[in-house]
Image: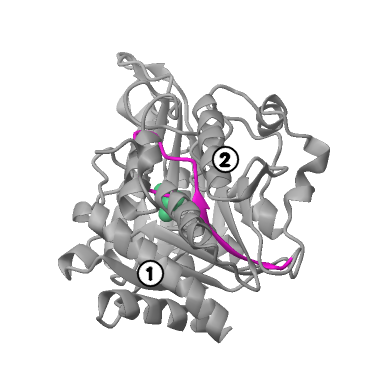
Amino acid sequence: MQPIAALPPSGQRVHARCDLLGRAPYSDDADGLFRPYLGAGYRATLDRIAGWMSDAGMSVRVDAIGNVVGRYEGTAPDAPSLLIGSHVDSVRHGGRYDGMLGVILGVEVVAAFAREGRRFPFALEVIGFGDEEGSRFPAAMLTSRTVAGVRDGFDLSMVDGEGISLAEALAEFGLDLAAIDEARIAPGHVLAYVEAHIEQGPVLEAEDRAVGVVSAIAAQHRYHVTMQGMAGHAGTISMPLRRDALAAAAEAIGAVERIGRAGPADLVATVGRLEVRPGAANVVPGDVMFTIDVRAGTNAVRDAAAGEILSEIREIAARRDIVPGIALQQDLDATPCDAHLTDLMEQAVTDVTGAPARVLVSGAGHDAMVMAHLVPVSMLFIRCEKGISHNPAEAVSTADVEVALRTLTDFVCLFERRS
Ligand code: HGY
Ligand code: MN
Ligand code: MN
């Protein structure tokens, strides 16, 4: 293959760039991709993306919360923008396309128009959000929340796995804690937000479609649960006298799965993280922490399941003389995409593929849920192999990326004509 720099704006170049960013020095892990917000890999990645944005004819800045933002001017100076973006961070042992594909596609859309010398009555901006996954700090979507002005649950003192606070990480990255709110987008500055993202599910592959259009994004709650019992000698504490935190958590985790399974098809409930202390084979566990992620197509289904889960946790704790601690860390409402933008995106898919667009709900969360507090949003899904994501095996085809690129450029032209 030609060197990436020599490639014209294309799905092939987008694919190659995402692959390049999937390894050192753009990851904090030597084996596999882990790009936590404000880490060393994150900084190297922002520098690389800034170079590509600049090559595409954009002015580039890193905003006050650490997002990278490129701007391609419209025909009038200081015109409001159509914002295209997704997230730059990744989960641990993540895939190369989750988030990054939407950012690099945005850069490529601008590069394609700049190559033709085409400009619009609006500016085109591309944003790489720094923290969508919440893979470094307990809360997630910190940077889109800041941009959208919905910073609830934003605690500068919260710490990562090494005990580094968000405040320290921001300062170490060179950001001014007093200026964070300058990242907030002023009303009227952005006309709409568009996010292209891998589907992270099986539908498009099952129906042999390269792309699909998102109608809505599922509601989610994320909880941090602690269970405090009493550590003790595994050989001397009789079973009736134990306050075994892990046995209590195991019963609670079983309840999470049972309640999730018993609900409607769009309800999912997951325990993704479990920490046991002191974690020795000959010690009755005294303290346990686990996370609960509950999602559904509507707030009502999410809330009913979450309520049932929490009351069962409290009953288990009371019966076992365990002290429970339950903290809600992520509270995202079900988010419909804008109807007009969705129509335009469906038209763009049809223009490019010749077929009516497949419209589907996203079970995965996205920065678009937060940006919907600020502006109308639209999402384009791209098929990913076997629906695999949050996994190094995550894969997309160059042909599908090319279809996504052409769909997004067509969307921009439709947005100009019909908005
Ligand atoms: O958890 C999610 O849905 C997203 O991948 N952060
Ligand atoms: Mn993800
Ligand atoms: Mn994502």
The foreground one among 13 and 91 is 13
Residue 309, percent across and down? 42, 57
Circle 1 residues within 10 Å: few <14, some 14–19, many ≥20: many
- Cα gap from disc 1 to disc 2, whole angstroms: 24 Å
Residue 157, percent across and down? 70, 33
* Residue 308 marker: none
Residue at 35 percent of width and 45 percent of height: 7
Instruction: From this view, report whether residue 212 is shown above or below residue 23.
Output: below
Residue 286 drawn in magenta: no
Residue beneath label 2, please?
Answer: 50
Q: Amino acid at mark 1?
A: Thr
Residue 286, percent across and down? 45, 25
Left or right of 123, for residue 115:
left
Left or right of 139, for residue 366:
left
> CB of residue at label 2: within 8 Å of ligand 3?
no
Circle 2 residues within 10 Å: few <14, some 14–19, many ≥20: many
Left or right of 305, for residue 40:
right
Residue at 25 percent of width and 47 percent of height: 395
* Secondary element at image label 1: helix
* Secondary element at image label 2: helix
Q: Is residue 173 visible?
A: yes
Span of residues in magenta: 79-99
